[in-house]
Image: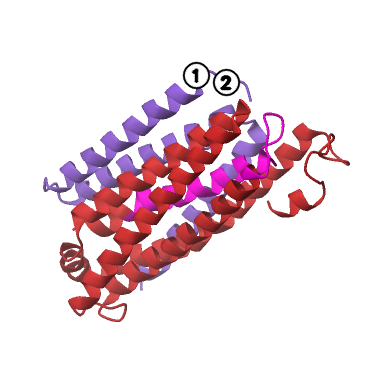
Amino acid sequence: MKEHDSGTRTYIVVWGALVMLTVVTVAVSYVHLGMMNVFVALLIASAKASLVALFFMHLRYENRLVWGFALAPLFFLVLIVVGTLSDTLFR
Amino acid sequence: MSGQSTHHGPGAAGHEAHMDPATAREAATLGIWTFLATEVLLFGGLFTSYIIYRIKYPQIFYEGHLKLDHVLGAINTVVLIGSSLTVALGIAAIRKGKVGLLRLYLFLTLLLAGTFLGIKYVEYTEKFSHGLYPDTDIFFSLYFMLTGLHGLHVLAGMVLLGAVLFLAGRGRYSESYHTPVEISGLYWHFVDLVWIYLFPLLYLLG
């Protein structure tokens, strides 16, 4: 792995961002935005998930093959959700 | 993960007889990501039922989420994020060959993981005392199933990281060889990832 010295500092900055995003998502939940609440909550959760995957899980420093292995399940997840909803929503 | 350590004794000069270390490390990385893919789909099935029933019974989900303790949920989110940080710092430490620091961070991680489960225990006890059980309604079925399955993953992660902590104490890991630490760390971060979605979906969205 390439980075060595900046590691600790980067991790603490990422941790700070994750805690801040947690505070934001709790704060936003008290504001009534209707369906937008779901959208904002999922957007913030995905931003947090990306930070964890990129920095804590080192995806940022991995090659394309590892990226492929890491992202492949998201395709199947979308397939399951969309496939199931296309059935249950239109019964 | 654990099978790897049986092939070579502690202190063996060449760790991998059949592969060069970089190849062995990449194989292990691809292995854990493949396992995590099956985990995404395991939780994915439950998330799918969450979406379907939320659309079908919005009122039950609205009333259910009001009965959860948002503060405890938020505290647990911060606890788990903190445990991800300590794992990451532990890996950064062993990359520099600092075994003592790795053990300290792993110990802190186990402490935070224990705190998470302790808070979860308080929450479950709270719910049971108010007559809220997995068979109460569809919201609490999903709540107990999702958080229960996640809790089991936290427990499994504690066993895994506990084993890494034990082996680190026996001098198994060094600056040049620490793949099991990284692989176990990836599993732990995944457990954190799942909670990052569970928290808003169960506690915050009305």
Residue displayed at 49% across by 39% down: B104
- The three-letter code of the residue at mark 1 reads Ser
- Tell me the colour scheme of the image: by chain
The label on residue A18 is none
Q: Horizontal and vertical percent for residue A85? A: 39, 63
Q: Which residues are magenta?
A: B169-198
| Left or right for B162, reference B118 | right
Picture layout, residue B50 above or below residue B201: below
Q: Colour of chain A?
A: purple
Q: Give me the residue at 54% from left, 29% from top.
A: A60
Q: Position of residue A55 (x, y in %)?
A: 48, 31
Q: What element does badge 1 sit on?
A: loop
Separation of disc 2 and disc 1 at Cα?
Answer: 6 Å
Disc ID at residue A6: 1
Q: Chain of mark 2?
A: A
Closer-to-camera residue (B97/A77): B97
Disc 2 designates what residue? A3
Q: What is chain B's hue in the picture?
A: red
Per the image, is A57 magenta? no
On the image, which quarter does residue B143 sit in? Answer: bottom left
**Would you say the residues marked 2 and 1 are in contact, meaning their CB atoms lie under 8 Å apart?**
yes
Q: Is residue B176 magenta?
A: yes
